[in-house]
């Protein structure tokens, strides 16, 4: 049988050659024993500190992997969830109104979400650094306001609640984050929460050529909720 573009003689020679050839055996590369020095006789490994349950929960809240731990959205928000999508962290994201989100935070904060909800609240309040991290206003707000349980989210979302039932949920319309902490602080202040100790977290300067030329301020119903900065 002829193959187009192939010389029958070459094909025949290759067939005989292939019969004589054997596939080379594979030998995995052995690690070079001299590449890593032998451990010293006096070497003592540093013990790894085990994370507590609260620390693990706080970390999972930050990473967005805790969805479904507390309960269904209906139980927490008081409203039916019309759709569940997937957020940027790969976790389920429930479609919920701001009122429902505030209600969910309040349910957890007042201890009405069962043992699982209590575990989440303890984790967030006890380990705010693991919920946010260095330079994050959500961490500074929880560190400065006693009992506050809060979490920032994508597209300008914020939720917060206190054990006495005061709760806030907000969404910045354009999805930006610059005004988020300011609006949260103003809303909490309007509910009678002293946010003065957290001013470093929510007082957001407006810069011009690297210098502060103003601050971000709330408007409308919250315009007078926060103390105004002292003019230089």
Image (cartoon, rainbow, N blue to C red):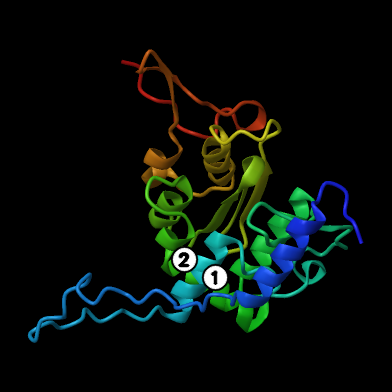
* Label 2 element class: helix
One can see residue 66 in this view: yes
User: Is residue 213 toward the left or the right of residue 158 in the image?
Assistant: left
Give the residue drawn at x 53%, y 26%: 217
Whole-percent x and y of residue 103?
72, 60
The one nearer the camera, 179 or 3, is 3
Q: Nearer the viewer, residue 35 or 138?
A: 35
The residue lying toward the viewer, choosing from 124 and 184, is 124
Residue 24 lies, in percent from the top left, at 53, 75
Eyeballing the image, is 20 above or below 83? Answer: below
Q: How crowded is mark 2: few (under 14 residues within 10 Å), some or many (20 or more)?
A: many
Residue identifier under label 2: 125
Residue 121 screen position, x and y as percent? 54, 70
Instruction: Measure the C-alpha gap from mark 2 to mark 1.
Output: 6 Å
Residue 158 placement, left or right of 34: right
Q: How many marks?
A: 2
Relative to 112, is 211 above or below? above
Q: Position of residue 130 (x, y in %)?
A: 44, 62
Q: Is mark 1 on a helix, strand or loop?
A: helix
Tell me the quarter of the image containing the C terminus: top left
Q: From the viewer's perspective, is 160 left or right of 226?
A: right
Placement of 191 over or under 86, stated as above or below = above
Q: In the drawing, what numbered circle is on residue 121?
A: 1
Residue found at the far front of this picture: 9
The image quadrant where one finds the N terminus is bottom right
Tell me where residue 87 sits by quadrant: bottom right
Residue found at x 69% / y 55%: 102
Q: Which mark is residue 160?
A: none
User: Going 53% across and 60% down the picture, which residue do you hit?
Assistant: 62
Proximity of marks 2 and 1: CB atoms separated by less than 8 Å = yes
């Amino acid at each position: 049988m002829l193959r187009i573009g192939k010389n029958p003689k070459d094909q025949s020679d290759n067939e005989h050659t292939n019969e004589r050839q054997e596939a080379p055996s594979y030998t995995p590369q052995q690690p070079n024993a001299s590449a890593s020095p032998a451990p010293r006789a006096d070497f003592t490994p540093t013990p790894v500190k085990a994370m507590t349950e609260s620390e693990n929960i706080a970390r999972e809240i930050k990473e967005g992997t805790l969805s479904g731990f507390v309960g269904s959205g209906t139980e927490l928000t008081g409203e039916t969830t019309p759709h569940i999508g997937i957020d940027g962290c790969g976790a389920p994201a429930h479609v919920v109104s701001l009122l429902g989100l505030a209600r969910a935070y309040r349910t957890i904060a007042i201890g009405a979400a069962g043992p699982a909800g209590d575990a989440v609240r303890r984790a967030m309040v006890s380990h705010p650094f693991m919920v946010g991290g260095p330079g994050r206003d959500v961490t500074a707000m929880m560190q400065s306001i006693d009992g506050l349980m809060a979490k920032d989210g994508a597209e300008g979302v914020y939720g917060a609640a206190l054990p006495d039932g005061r709760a806030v949920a907000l969404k910045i319309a354009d999805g930006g984050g610059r005004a988020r902490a300011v609006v949260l602080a103003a809303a909490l202040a309007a509910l009678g929460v002293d946010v003065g100790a957290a001013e470093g977290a929510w007082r957001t300067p407006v810069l011009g050529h690297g210098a502060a030329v103003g601050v971000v301020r709330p408007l409308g119903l919250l315009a007078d909720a926060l103390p105004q900065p002292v003019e230089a």
